[in-house]
Image (cartoon, grey):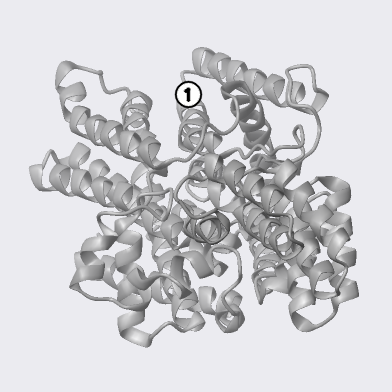
Amino acid sequence: MITDRARWRDAGLLAAAFLLIGLVVYGRSLGNAFVEWDDHLLITANPIVTDPSWAMLWRAFTTYDPELYIPLTFVSYQLTTLAAGVQPWAFHFGNLLLHVINALLVAWTAFLLLPKSSSRFPIPAFVVGLLFLLHPLHTEAVAWASARKDVLSVLFSLASTVAFLQYRSTQRTAFYAASLGLFLAALLSKVTPLLLPAVYLLIDWMHRRPITRRTLAEIAPFVLASVVFFAVAVWGKEGGGALLTDKLLLGAKATVFYLGKLVIPTGLSVLYPYTKPIGILTPDLLLSLAAIVTMTIALVILGARNAVRWPLAAWAAYLLLLAPTFGTVAKGHNELLDAYFASDRYAYLPSVAAFLAAGGGIALLERWKRSIGVAAFVVIACGFAVLAYRQSLVWRDTETLFRHTARHYPNAYVAHTNLGVILVRRGDVNGGLEEFRKALEIREDATTLYNVGQILRAQGKRQLAMIAFARALRASPLETDAAVALATMLREDGKIPEARQIIREALENVPGHEELLRLQSEIMPAG
């Protein structure tokens, strides 16, 4: 008989082992810099983070980031600042520590859900937790300081799930209250796990518990919280974004894409641009939909014939946990060249369902093929560790990050634009212009054109600069920097009516813009 003391000792050893493995794989990435990809917006130039105080704590709970409501994420950033200052290593270490805890929670969840073995050490649960810890697809969530909201939200989601499973087995009210409180904390970190209550119902269905009025009453507070936080999330979003059909089609592609990357995690990137027409007849989108439908039908048939529910439950949980990310599709101004169908961190929580399914398979194999299964796992784990280590160094700095992206996805115009800015800042103007040229070949992007105009203006090529600024405004009337620059140059050339027209049109799109209003007041006739 295993004593409680032995269980706690084993848990402590497992936690120490996971932390050590995490440090071996990700330790070098603790020296990574902040990257100019939201880190500036969320951390280094954000007074909520850089100046932790009671006033900033209140502001964390009363503002967006600018689109997401993530107050507990801001609080975690504030704690990091208080502990070590605004140092990159501290924010990276915080993410790594949360990731290690998440891996332990995944192992705990697997232990509670998967069939128990006769051995003292729960091999399937250990395998599931370690795969989660080492998988390269999770590197973005660990190595990117701005992904704190993802790892923190998942931590509370997993802890809520563990508490809910404990409630189901003990019926102790304390576990139910803890599960609900932790779920609220997850939503306060990031709204992504809002469909977790449906997963709890799936778990009941998988365990053949009847869905009674009491069951629904227990789930109701979770659903209410999801509805409230969904409304808060919608309120914070700017613009309409892509069409619903576009989101669903690209979401289908992402669903299959993540499964592929879970099996073969190579070619990972911070950006995954989609440059084909988005429609039901586009071959890869149609194939993705067909694959999802086929998988669903096959698992339904499997469950009906063999009375095995866990594969279908795991598949449905994967889809439910991934579905909230479908609304993040970005759509640009040049047809569909500015659509992105995936982001590695969006698979962070859904991957738990996939790993649990793998753990279920391991639990079945354990009885008669344990040695083969363990050997295969060791090989896979070592391969994942090497790939995760390499991928973590892609986040070393902004230039390394976007050179990697441009190499793997040349159609990612944002990568070329960001590289151009870096090169110009370094003094390599020609190199910067070349990157801007590559970006403009992909899309007539307003920001890129503004950057080109600024270079031409500095070189004294005024006419070419004004043409670039005008093109930027045609590409996006919201490009206020280009409007200010063009109006200023027209004013300098004595073309006051043209300058007034540019300002007037810009203010129609961005009312109240301070610099435009100042410029307007300077050139408008008295009275």
Task: Please say whether residue 122 is visible from this viewpoint.
Answer: no
Q: Nearer the viewer, residue 450 or 318?
A: 450
317 sits to left or right of 49 = right
The residue depicted at 29 percent of the width and 66 percent of the height is 75
254 sits to left or right of 21 = right
Q: Nearer the viewer, residue 401 or 513?
A: 513
Q: Position of residue 283 (x, y in %)?
A: 82, 23
- Residue bearing mark 1: 308
* Rendered position, 481 above or below 19: above
* Rendered position, 184 above or below 449: above
Q: Residues within 10 Å of mark 1 (few under 14, many from 20)?
A: some
Q: Position of residue 299 (x, y in %)?
A: 57, 21
Task: Please say whether residue 383 is visible from this viewpoint.
Answer: yes
The quadrant in which residue 422 appears is bottom right
Q: Nearer the viewer, residue 176 or 108?
A: 176
The residue depicted at 84 percent of the width and 68 percent of the height is 456
Disc 1 is placed on an element classified as: loop
The residue depicted at 65 percent of the width and 37 percent of the height is 331
| Extreme residue in the bottom direction | 84
Q: Position of residue 292 (x, y in %)?
A: 64, 24
Q: Position of residue 507 (x, y in %)?
A: 53, 45
| Extreme residue in the front direction | 527
Q: Nearer the viewer, residue 295 or 66?
A: 66
